[in-house]
Image: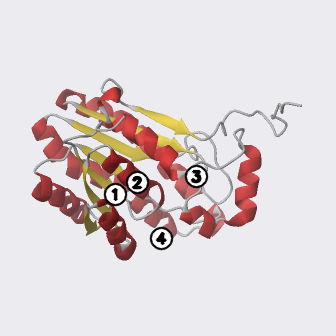
Amino acid sequence: MRGRLDGKVALVIGAARGIGKATALRFAEEGARLVLADTEIEAGQAAADEIGAAFIRTDISQMADAEAAVALALDRHGRLDILVQNAGIYPWQLIENTSPDDWDRVMAVNLRGTFNATRASLVPMKAQRFGRMLYTSSITGPHVTSPGHGHYAATKAGINGFIRSAALEFSGYGITVNGVEPGNILTEAIQMHRGAAYIKNMEDSIPLGRLGSPREVANAFLFLASDDASYITGTTIVVDGGQLLPEGKDFRLLPP
């Protein structure tokens, strides 16, 4: 099926690589017109060129940058129907080694960035009385965590709370607000910053026996952005290969 986003305009923030780029590609396949935003200029522009979209350098922790990205979508396409706020950082730091500046930086990008993107997008969506606001959360924070992810887990749990509040406040404007909670997804960042041992350990803990692909997360975003999800708001979709299910390590029932 094609054309589920025909006529829709989408802004994807954090679109240079990984889940964000896969989501932008998936939306383009379904007919959306796109604006891509990221701090990585070269990779972001390359992704935009591949898709045939506009690109703007955006530090989502800054409200002025969020407003500029929305303004570009309005200037190019006259409206904004879909926001995907995917930008986020996850440095590995034990709490005892995390400085206040380290903490504030993760909060600024992941949590304040979510607020900034929302406030900027609300203006046109409220005026047109339609919108889909979508956020990349995580299973880390709302459900599980591991050492070294204290600040990251806090932001993702915060995003889930924000989703529920925004969904309630914006419901009268025809705006739905939802998120996707990825588990371990095989992105460039995971390969670069976590390494083979981490990936193998995660594969062993996932019932489906592998990490997910960015496109599999993008498919969840596509559903939430489409008319198929018109009566869904204030919730998240877990995309984790069953990682949350096991009670312990001995969970596989393999056929003989």
- Which residue is at a point 45% across and 59% down the rendered structure image? 88
Q: Amino acid at mark 4?
A: Asp
Pointer 3: what residue?
Answer: 185
Secondary structure beneath label 2 = loop
Do callouts 2 and 1 mark residues in contact (Cβ within 8 Å)?
yes
Distance of mark 2 from mark 4, alpha carbons?
A: 22 Å
Q: Amino acid at mark 1?
A: Ile
Pointer 4: what residue?
Answer: 101
Residue 192, quarter of the rendered image: bottom right
7 over 185 or under it: above or below: above
Q: Tag 1 or tag 4, which sits nearer the N-term?
A: 1
Do callouts 1 and 3 mark residues in contact (Cβ within 8 Å)?
no
Q: How many neighbours does mark 3 have within 10 angstroms: few (below 14), some (14-19), or many (20 or more)?
A: many
Q: How many neighbours does mark 4 have within 10 angstroms: few (below 14), some (14-19), or many (20 or more)?
A: few
- Which residue is at a point 35% across and 43% down the rendered structure image? 134
Q: Tag 4 or tag 2, which sits nearer the N-term?
A: 2
Q: Is residue 43 visible?
A: yes
Residue 194: percent from the left, percent from the top?
65, 65
Looking at the rendered image, the disc whose residue lies closer to the viewer, 1 or 3, is 3
Residue 130: percent from the left, percent from the top?
18, 35
Pointer 1: what residue?
Answer: 13
Residue 140: percent from the left, percent from the top?
58, 47
Q: Tag 2 or tag 3, which sits nearer the N-term?
A: 2
